[in-house]
Amino acid sequence: MGDGSVNPVNDEINRFAPREQPRTSTSDYQKTMADHGGKDILSSDVEIKGSIKFQKELLIDGKVEGEINSDGVLTIGENADIRGEIKTKSITVYGKVQGNITVGERCELKSKCTLQGDLKAARLVIEEGATFVGKSEVTSGMAAAKPAAPRPEVVRNEEPVKAFASRA
């Protein structure tokens, strides 16, 4: 008897439940996860006060006030506004950062980003149009990079670097 009364209720729920919507949202979610390669994402409407720690990859597109520590890969999105110390293995900055960045491997400052703070990295890429106010220290172990290390300003524009390289 219990089965007989449950089935019509289930049929009724199934009849009124939008069948397409759950499939769409699941595939949208999977597509989003595939697009970001399994990165953790803090979207543009997220605001955090406090410290953040993560393991693998994190994309921050919101506001963070506090320090960020990781041995992973950090991406600062175009809408991001970060105020605090950042220590990671690798970072790509598209948005705003106010604070010092210390990176074990690679730091990339994209064309529309703003960094106000000091920067330490093994490898540094600064695109044309990036705003960087602070000191940089490139701690590369490569012999070819050592002569350029005392003058990090030379690294900012691509043309002087080529001229400098051709003179050497």
Image (cartoon, helix red, strand yellow):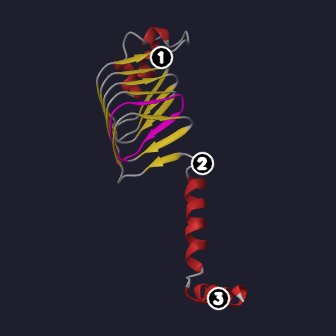
From the viewer's perspective, tell me whether residue 45 is left or right of residue 162.
left
| Amino acid of disc 3 | Asp
| Amino acid of disc 1 | Ala
| Amino acid of disc 2 | Gly
Residue at image location 55% in from the left, 69% down from the top: 25
Q: Secondary structure at mark 3?
A: helix
CB contact under 8 Å: marks 1 and 3:
no
Q: Which residues are magenta?
A: 62-79
Quadrant hosting residue 127: top left
In the image, 51 versus 150, the foreground residue is 51
Residue at image location 52% in from the left, 46% down from the top: 40
Q: Which residue is mark 3?
A: 11
Residue 132: where, in percent of width, then height? 31, 29
Q: Which mark is residue 94?
A: none
Task: Indicate yes or no whether the magenta region holds residue 119.
Answer: no
Residue at image location 37% in from the left, 35% down from the top: 128
Q: Which residue is mark 1?
A: 165
Q: Mark 2 Cα within 10 Å, few/some/many (few <14, many 20+)?
A: few
Q: Which mark is residue 37?
A: 2
State the CA–CA distance, disc 1 to disc 2: 37 Å
